[in-house]
Structures are given as structure tokens and as C-alpha cells.
Amino acid sequence: MLKYLGISAILVLLDHGTKYWAIVALKGKPAWPQGWTLFRFDYAENYNMAFSMTFIPMPLVNVLAIGAMGLLFYLLWEYKDKHILPSIGLAFILGGAFGNIPERLMRGYVVDFISVDWPDWLFFTRWPTFNIADSAVNVGMVLYLGYVFFVEGKKNKPVVLEIEQ
């Protein structure tokens, strides 16, 4: 289990290091590199949930997030000796959570700085600005849910017996 917690710790350090860089290098300045539209670094403070959604009050989001971290520790403990893929996925989710939750509790917002263009016809004119922790959570969810649905799901698929009449 320690190796997976080590992955989480590396992600937290990477996340906080890049957020510190964003504060020092980007806050109050234009996006960098200037003139780029597909990909750029652009400082933003997110006072809400993912994608700046506001339909749940932030104190409740924080309580739910802390509870979810407990669930993540439990799941990581359960999967630690079974299969590497869900364990790495859970470690990424946990690292992302530890990247954003303390920042939200201490500052009241999360620093975002990665901005990617998105075709105008798909929901947003630009994809919402994000950070390393957000990326870690998304990669972790793909790994974990991919395992649950495509590997565990096939193992636990009920067998249908056909009876000839």
C-alpha cells in the first residue's frame, strides 16, 4: 500500500509545485505563451466545484470530499494486493484529492492554470481551466472504472445456461 501512497504523494508535490509556479509566474499576467490558442497557461482561481459548478454549497462539497477520501483509503486497502490497475487509479484519485482539498479549505479556492481550446460546438468555447490535481483525478477515474467495468465486470458476469428442449 505504501507504494501507492507514494504515487499519491508525488502527485500532491507535483500539483502544489506547479500551483506555486502558476501563482509566481502567471498571477496578474496575460496567458503564456501569448498568441497560442490550442494550449496555454492562464492563471485562474476556482471558488466553486469542478468546472466552476455551483449547485452544491461549498461547505457541503468540502465535507463530502473529506468523506470520499476516507472511502478512497478503504478501497486502496482492499485492492492493494489484488490488481495494480485499480490501485494506481485510486492512488491518482487520492493524490488529486489531496492536491485540491487542503487548498480549498485554507484559501477558499483552488488555483487552476492549464487552459486547452475546445471546439465551440461542444458545451464550452474553451475547456474550463484545470490543474495537475484535476488531471490526476480524471486519469485515476478512467483507470479505476475501466478496471471495474471491463475486468471485474467480465469476471462477475452471470453465466446463462441454455437448456435444450
Image (spheres, rainbow, N blue to C red):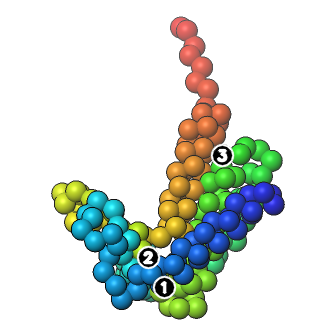
Percent x, y for residue 5?
74, 63
How far apart in space, not on screen, are marks 1 and 2 (Cα)?
13 Å
Percent x, y for residue 40?
35, 67
Say which amino acid is labelled 1. Answer: Val
Percent x, y for residue 155?
65, 34
Q: Residue furthest left?
A: 121
Q: Mark 1 or mark 2: which is in front?
A: 1
Q: Mark 1 or mark 3: which is in front?
A: 1
What residue do we see at 53% from left, 8% from top?
165
Q: Is residue 126 left or right of residue 79?
A: left
Say which amino acid is labelled 3. Answer: Leu
Q: Which residue is mark 1?
A: 24
Q: Secondary structure at mark 3?
A: helix
What residue do we see at 60% from left, 63% from top?
93
How far apart in space, not on screen, are marks 1 and 3 (Cα)?
36 Å
Residue 18, placed above or below residue 92: below
Q: Which residue is mark 2?
A: 112
Q: Secondary structure at mark 2?
A: strand
Determine crowd level at label 1: few under 14, some 14-19, many 20+ residues with C-alpha closer than 10 A: few
**Residue 131 seen in the current view:** yes
Pick whichever of labels 1 and 2 is earlier in the sequence.
1
Pick whichever of labels 1 and 3 is earlier in the sequence.
1
What residue do we see at 54% from left, 81% from top?
20
Q: Are marks 1 and 3 in contact (CB under 8 Å)?
A: no
Q: Which residue is mark 3?
A: 85
